[in-house]
Amino acid sequence: MHVHLPKPMHGWREFAGEVGIIVIGVLIALGAEQVIESLRWQREAHEAIASLKDEIADHYFSGSEAMIAAPCIDRQLALLEQRLTKPGSYAPAPMYSESSIDYTFRAPDRLWSDDVWRSIVSEGVASHLPADIRLSLAAYYSQVAGARTNNAETQILNYRLRVLAQPLQPDVATRARLIEEIEEARGRFKEAALYSSQMLRNSEEIKLNPSQQYLNERLARSGTIKFCRAHQLPLGNNRAVF
C-alpha cells in the first residue's frame, strides 16, 4: 500500500517558503512582545524608584532629627536619673505638654514607614530594578524595620517614665527599676542614632537622599529640636558615620 502525500498547490519549495515566513513572523511578534514587556518593566522600575524617593526622604529627615537630637535626649534622661540618685526626698520631674501629649522628656516619635517598598516587592517590580540598587534597598529597608521597632520600644519607655512627674516617694527598689528604664531608654536612643547614621549613608550611596532645602525645612519644624533649643540643651549633627 502506498501513501500519497498531498502536494502543495505551488510545490514544496513555495510551501516551505510560506511556512518560513509564518515562523519568522511569529518569532518577530514574540520578540516584539518581549521588548514591549521589557520596556513596561523598565518604566515601572523607574516609577518605583521615583516613589521611593519620597519615602526615603522622610526617613532621611527622621534619621537626621534623631542624630541631631541625640545629645539633647541623653542629657534629659541624665537629669531624670539624677533626681532618682540624689539623696533625700524625691523631687518630681516637670511634666511638659504639647498637642495633648504629656512627657517628662522630649524625643522624636516617627513612623519609619516602608509601605512603598512593600508595595514594590509585592507587585514584582523589585525584581526588575538594577541588581545593585535592589540589594542596597533590601539592606536599607531591613534597617528601617529595626528603626521602627526601636522607636516603638522607646515610646513605651517614654510613657512609663511619665510617672517621674508624680508627687510620689519611690522606695529603693522602685528607684532602681526606674533607673534601669532610663538607662534602657538612653541605650535605645543611642541605637536609634546609629541606625540613622547608617541609613543616611546608604541613601546617599544610592543617590535617593532628599535636597538640603527639603531637609532644612523639615528640621526647622521639629518639635524635639525646638524643645532642646528652648531649654538650652546640647544638639549634635547629622553627619553620617562611615
Image: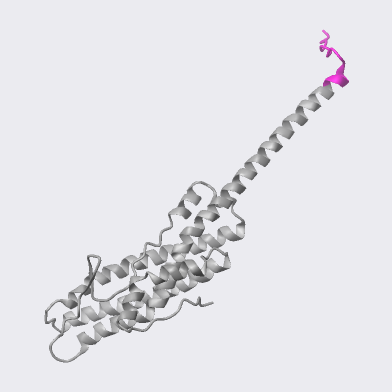
Q: Residue at x 17, y 92 (%)?
A: 87
Q: Is residue 117 left or right of residue 24?
A: left
Identify the image quadrant of the C terminus: bottom right
The image quadrant of residue 63 is bottom left
Closer to the camera, 186 or 239? Answer: 239
138 lies above or below 229: above
Closer to the camera, 124 or 51? Answer: 51
Tell whether position 12 is magenta: yes
Q: Is residue 58 left or right of residue 93?
A: right
Q: Residue at x 33, y 83 (%)?
A: 233
38 lies above or below 134: above
The x, y position of residue 171, in whole percent, is 13, 83
The image quadrant of residue 132 is bottom right
Tell whether position 196 is magenta: no
Can residue 224 be seen here? The reply is: yes
Q: Is residue 66 left or right of residue 121?
A: left
Q: Residue at x 57, y 65 (%)?
A: 207
Identify the main secondary structure in magenta: loop
Q: Residue at x 53, y 52 (%)?
A: 48
Identify the image quadrant of the N terminus: top right
Closer to the camera, 163 or 51? Answer: 51
Can residue 142 be seen here? The reply is: no
- Residue furthest bottom as drawn: 87
The x, y position of residue 34, in whole percent, is 66, 40
Render colour scheme: one colour
The image quadrant of residue 35 is top right
The x, y position of residue 238, in whole percent, is 46, 76
Q: Which residues are magenta?
A: 1-15
Q: How many numbered marks, from 0 up?
A: 0
The x, y position of residue 69, in whole percent, is 38, 77
46 lies above or below 10: below
